[in-house]
Image (cartoon, grey):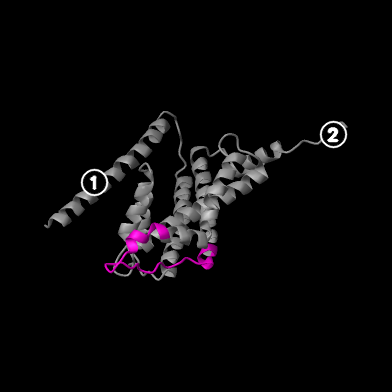
């Protein structure tokens, strides 16, 4: 084994162990807290939650794949979902940067450039956040501020930070500058940078909106699995009705 291959193997093992450790930590504390309560889990609802969650992530991975194809990349088909879901686990590692690294490295190949793959990973994440911010704003406009968890200030920050970046011309300009070192050729010139278009933004808004909704549906099924007596939809409706100004019938 050559020295470079040996270091590559060591790095792969280190990253794998890092992800395993932080995923374990992320799940250990909540499971310990659940163990303190006498819960009767509804496994049918848990299965439905898992299906809804995978369906939501399926929308995101489809958008990422379409983004790669729109930029002329032809990754190995099986590598795309593998890279996406392995990278998804890396979100538990502090900093989130490992997500971009893993998905980019795992999906790159002879017909999929490194810097283009990294660009699409970042764009998929930004569109997810931007669409989520818009949906959150709609929820707050309809239902009102949700205590300290979601209020007008939070929504304003989310909209200002994520939504402008999903606009392809602005995103392309930023990523073209950031990926410049990766596109430098031996003769000093740079490889051309493919640009995302408005059509991919339209697909992204649709697919990432579906992803956000399905993740919310998954959470509702988790609530039902723990508390079968609770109807999440009815609770939201009752909370909204109670927050509306009550008519003064005595006047």
Picture residue at 58% right of the left edge, 44% below the top:
155
Left or right: 45 as drawn, with respect to 101: right
Q: Give the image location of residue 85, x and y in percent.
A: 37, 54
Task: Kindly identify which residue carries mark 1.
Answer: 14
The vertical placement of 58 against 27, above or below, is below
Taking the view exactly as shown, the residue that stands out farthest to the right is: 251
> Distance between the Cα atoms at labels 2 and 1?
68 Å
Q: Give the image location of residue 65, x and y in percent.
A: 42, 64
Picture residue at 63% right of the left edge, 39% below the top:
145
**Mark before the other along the chain sequence, 2 or 1:** 1
Picture residue at 41% right of the left edge, 31% below the top:
33
- Is residue 223 visible in the rendered structure shown here? yes
Taking the view exactly as shown, the residue that stands out farthest to the top is: 36
Q: Residues within 10 Å of mark 2 (few under 14, many from 20)?
A: few
Q: Residues within 10 Å of mark 1 (few under 14, many from 20)?
A: few
Is residue 132 found inside the magenta-colored segment of the image?
A: no
- Is residue 213 visible in the rendered structure shown here? no
Q: Quadrant of the C terminus?
A: top right
Quadrant of res 206: bottom right
Magenta segment boundaries in residue numbering: 177-202
Task: Kindly identify which residue carries mark 2.
Answer: 249
Q: Quadrant of the N terminus?
A: bottom left
Picture residue at 42% right of the left edge, 33% below the top:
34
Q: Give the image location of residue 208, x and y in percent.
A: 51, 56
Q: Give the image location of residue 35, x and y in percent.
A: 40, 31
Helix, strand or loop at mark 2: loop
Quadrant of res 230: top right
Front-lying residue, 218 or 153: 153
Taking the view exactly as shown, the residue that stands out farthest to the front is: 188
Helix, strand or loop at mark 1: helix
Taking the view exactly as shown, the residue that stands out farthest to the left is: 1
Front-lying residue, 141 or 5: 5
């Amino acid at each position: 084994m050559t020295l470079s291959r040996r270091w590559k193997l060591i790095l792969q093992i280190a990253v794998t162990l890092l992800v395993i450790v932080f995923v374990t930590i992320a799940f250990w504390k909540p499971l310990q807290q659940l163990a303190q309560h006498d819960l009767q889990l509804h496994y049918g609802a848990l299965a439905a939650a898992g299906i809804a969650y995978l369906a939501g992530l399926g929308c995101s991975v489809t958008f990422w794949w379409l983004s790669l194809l729109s930029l002329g990349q032809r990754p190995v088909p099986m590598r795309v979902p593998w890279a996406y879901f392995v990278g998804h686990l890396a979100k538990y590692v502090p900093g989130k940067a490992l997500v971009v690294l893993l998905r980019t490295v795992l999906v790159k190949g002879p017909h999929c450039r490194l810097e283009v793959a990294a660009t699409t990973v970042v764009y998929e994440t930004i569109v997810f956040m931007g669409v989520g911010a818009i949906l959150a704003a709609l929820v707050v406009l309809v239902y009102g501020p949700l205590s300290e968890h979601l209020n007008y200030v939070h929504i304003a920050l989310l909209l200002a930070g994520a939504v402008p970046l999903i606009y392809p011309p602005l995103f392309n300009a930023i990523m073209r500058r950031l990926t410049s070192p990766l596109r430098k050729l031996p003769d000093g010139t740079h490889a051309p940078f493919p640009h995302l278009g408005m059509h991919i933004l339209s697909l992204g808004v649709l697919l990432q909106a579906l992803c956000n909704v399905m993740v919310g549906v998954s959470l509702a099924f988790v609530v039902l699995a723990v508390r079968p007596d609770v109807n999440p939809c009815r609770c939201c409706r009752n909370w909204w009705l109670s927050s509306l100004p009550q008519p003064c019938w005595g006047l």
